[in-house]
Amino acid sequence: MKLFKRKKKRGWIRKSLNIIGLTVLFFLSIPQSFDLPVEGMKINDFNHESYWYYPWGKSGTHKGVDIFAKTGTKVNASVRGFTFATGSGGMSGKFVIVLGPKLRFHYFAHLNSIKTTIGSWNNIGDQIGTVGATGNAKGKPAHLHYSIVSWVPNFWRIDFDPQGWKKMFFLNPTDYIMDSYDK
């Protein structure tokens, strides 16, 4: 009897691993395309030097870029992918995380409103929220905090900056934004 139950568990584990493997292959095969996350944003709407800026409030180091816009401006999916998480609270305020190509998380924080649900598919340009000033941005000008985080560590990015070891998981969004303007 115990042997039978064990086989059932192994079957479930194998199926789960197959699903995970197929999901990983799917996300690795999505073409890497990128578009600006804030509708109508201009090249001067963000500080090009704010990525990995130190010192930066309670987090110590600023691990993304802040894109300034009027409250309620559309925030769009900058990549194809599905809504991995949404929520509200803490330093982020209202946030959305989109899992996109190459298994990278695209993190949108300080939103005024969320216009997507967990598990929904987003094409580039689909609205996922609106610009706001929630979380630790309360009382400051409305903006979108945008970060790109990798599951796969890029060890060669580590340096001696404050929290520099964390750079192995973060990509500089400024590079993607500037490349989008060059198109």
Image (spheres, rainbow, N blue to C red):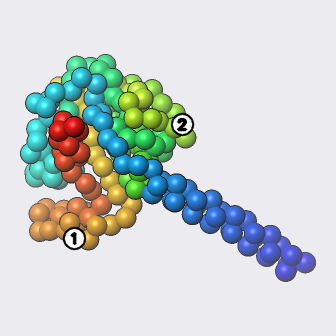
Can you give x and y, in whole percent of width and height, for residue 80 in the image?
Answer: 43, 41
Amino acid type at image mark 2: Ser
* Vertical relation: 52 (above or below) 158: above
Count of labels shown?
A: 2
Secondary structure under the numbered disc 2 in the rendered image? loop
Residue drawn at x 38%, y 30% is 125
**Could you tell me the amino acid type at mark 1?**
Trp
In the picture, the quarter occupied by the N terminus is bottom right
User: Residue visible at 13% across and 62% down?
Assistant: 162
SS for callout 1: helix
Give above or below for 115 relative to 18: above
Residue farthest along the right direction in this orientation: 1
Asked if residue 91 can be seen in this view, the reply is no
Camera-nearest residue between 28 and 60 = 28
Crowding at dot 2, Cα within 10 Å, few <14 / some 14-19 / many 20+, comes out as few
Q: Position of 6 compared to 28: left or right?
A: right
**Residue occupied by mark 2:** 120
Position of residue 101 measured from the top left corner of the image (x, y, whole percent): 41, 51
Q: What residue sits 46% from the left and 43% below the top?
A: 81
Give the position of the C terminus as an image quadrant.
Answer: top left
**Mark 2 or mark 1: whose residue is earlier in sequence:** 2
Give the CA separation, mark 2 to mark 1: 34 Å
Whether residues under marks 2 and 1 lie with C-beta atoms below 8 angstroms apart, the answer is no
Residue receiving disc 1: 156
- In the image, residue 91 lies at what x, y percent? 29, 41
Task: State the image quarter where residue 92 is shown.
Answer: top left
160 shown above or below 24: below
Between 101 and 48, the residue placed more toward the observer is 101
Q: Nearer the viewer, residue 50 or 120?
A: 120
Does any portion of residue 39 appear in the rendered image?
A: yes
Task: Point out residue 158 in the picture as x, y percentages from the top left corner.
Answer: 19, 68
